[in-house]
Image (cartoon, grey):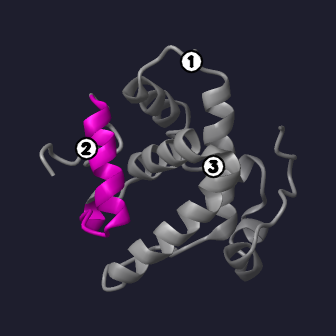
Amino acid sequence: MTTPIAAPDDRTAFRTTDEIRDLVAAFEDTTLPYGRWTHAAHLAVGTWYTLWYGRAQAMPRMRVALQRYNAAHAHEPMKVGYHETMTGFWLWAIDRALRQMPVERSLAELVNGVVEAHADRQLPLRYYTRDRLMSPAARRTWTEPDVRPLEP
């Protein structure tokens, strides 16, 4: 990689497409240090996948990449591990945010807009009860919200 991996924390804005591409590459090849796999980094990668592959293909790609990354970092103290419903929820939220942004923005501006719009990690709890969202079933398979529906 020629540029440093961006998003060391959730307050760092992305400056260039190269930073985002390098982040995605390091995530995909599992060389991204676990401490840099932040909420902002998750959102940046999800935004990249949504923009490049579309919402329908972003989910299976994100699932495979997350499971591979988690397996490579299994020695780290993970709080949750892979969670199918959370992954699907955040990709839905990313897609929704992107559809509300001007298309003439740069990739860095789009990613930063998504990160800013979805900085609140508790957002899923506006749609799910904690029990439903944290259930073993929701971790394994997509589970519909039980508080309010996801708007198209």
Q: Secondary structure at mark 2?
A: loop
How far separated are the C-alphas under marks 2 and 3?
20 Å
Q: Amino acid at mark 3?
A: Leu
Q: Main secondary structure of the magenta part?
A: helix
Out of 123 and 82, give the one closest to the viewer. Answer: 82
Q: Residue at x 67, y 75 (%)?
A: 139
**For mark 2, what is the residue?**
6
> Going from the N terminus, do you reach mark 1 or mark 3 first?
3
Give the position of the C terminus as an image quadrant.
top right
Residue 104 in the image, given as x and y percentages of width and height: 51, 14
How far separated are the C-alphas under marks 1 and 3?
18 Å
Residue 31 in the image, given as x and y percentages of width and height: 24, 67
**For mark 3, what is the residue?**
91
19 drawn magenta: yes
> Going from the N terminus, do you reach mark 2 or mark 3 first?
2
**Image quadrant where residue 62 sits:** bottom right
| 51 sits to left or right of 2 | right
Q: Nearer the viewer, mark 1 or mark 3?
A: 1
CA neighbours of label 1 inside 10 A, class few (<14), some (14 to 19), many (20+): few
Q: Amino acid at mark 2?
A: Ala
**For mark 1, what is the residue?**
103
Q: Secondary structure at mark 3?
A: helix
Q: Is residue 78 above or below residue 92?
A: below
Q: Is residue 79 visible?
A: yes
- Magenta residues (range): 16-35
Q: Amino acid at mark 1?
A: Val
Q: Is residue 99 above or below residue 3?
A: above
Number of numbered labels in the structure image: 3
**Image quadrant where residue 136 sits:** bottom right
| 85 sits to left or right of 87 | right
